Amino acid sequence: MTLSLYHFMTSIKIFCPATIANLSCGFDVLGLCLDGVGDEMIVKKTIEKGVRITKIVGADLPLATEKNVAGVAALALLEATTTDFGFEIEIYKKIKAGSGIGSSAASAAGAVFAINALLDNPFSRKELVAFAMQGEKLASGSAHADNVAPALLGGFTLVRSYHPLDIIKIESPDQMYATVIHPQIELKTSDARSVLKQTVSLKSAIIQWGNVGGLIAGLYTNDYELIGRSLHDEIVEPLRSVLIPGFEAVKNAALQNGALGSGISGSGPSIFALSKGKSIAEKVAKVMSTVFDELQLPYEIHVSKINNEGIRILDN
């Protein structure tokens, strides 16, 4: 019998990437995974059963397992397994909470990925999404998968159905880059959800699902112009954009300087733009920055290739 490397592992260090959810037309069903922007986590096996959060660096978040998204997600996974040991989790946050680029998702997805690896991978990455969603439920009140799915699977992801959970991974076109600017204000997902309407007009719905279909088709065929035409939000962006200072100016600056499309990243306040090629993405970053410079609003900005791998193991 051959034992895998994971069988002997007692500790694992991982990179948990940031993500962009919704992608304008795909509220709660579309997301993508960023590269180079993310948290790190260290998870260790312990003799004592259960899950303990022992350290959080970079953010003021609860250590109590039941109040931490990583802890809740980890407990959901353990309920589906039988183990005679427990786990300690250290979280090194580099994605700010409330930034709109999947801070809670990185923690929740990272916890289940690491524990699964230390258990010798009883679950596939796709199966881990359901456990990570429980962390998102704690964070926002809604067990959505549009951030945790790309964090775990990489690339672009489509949640075709939540009941039953059915997720499709789509490899990113080679020249696709994302620019994300995060104004230093906090916008809680729960607050951003509170402004949404529970019903939409048939006219708006038709426009929206046409754009979702167009975006998926564009990704599969590497049709960058089709991708750009499809990055339009008829339903959510008009309601949420008023919560983000300078949104229209940032979006227009991105589009006028070559971005394929631009919109709210997740629930905001971050604003994303997708571009064909790194040079355009960097040019877009400069003009986005100029808008917030003029508003005298501090910000962080990232230019990233799309990460087709998702969460990855780091050398200890």
Image: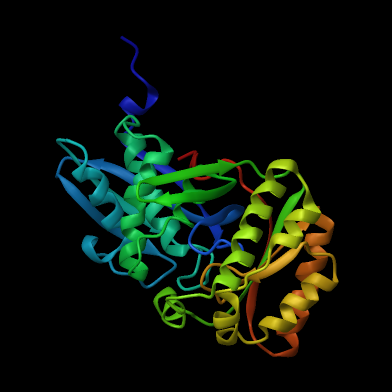
Q: Quadrant of the C terminus?
A: top left
- Residue 128, image x, y percentages: 37, 43
Q: Position of residue 203 (x, y in %)?
A: 60, 72
Q: Position of residue 310 (x, y in %)?
A: 53, 45
Q: Does 122 sit left or right of 17 as displayed?
A: left
Q: Is residue 144 visible?
A: yes
In this view, 313 is above or below 5:
below
Of residues 195 and 127, the one drawn nearer to the viewer in this rendering:
195
Q: How is the image coloured?
A: rainbow
Residue under the image location 23 percent in, 54 percent down? 52
Q: Is residue 24 visible?
A: no
Is 313 placed above or below 68 here? above
Left or right, residue 294 beside residue 81? right
> Residue 134 at x, y = what percent?
31, 57
Closer to us: 109 or 218: 218
Quarter of the image for residue 69 reads: bottom left
Residue shown at the point (67%, 54%) measured from the top left: 215
Q: Nearer the viewer, residue 296 or 257?
A: 257
- The image shows residue 99, relative to residue 223, as above or below, that is below
| Residue drawn at 39 percent across, 34 percent down | 124
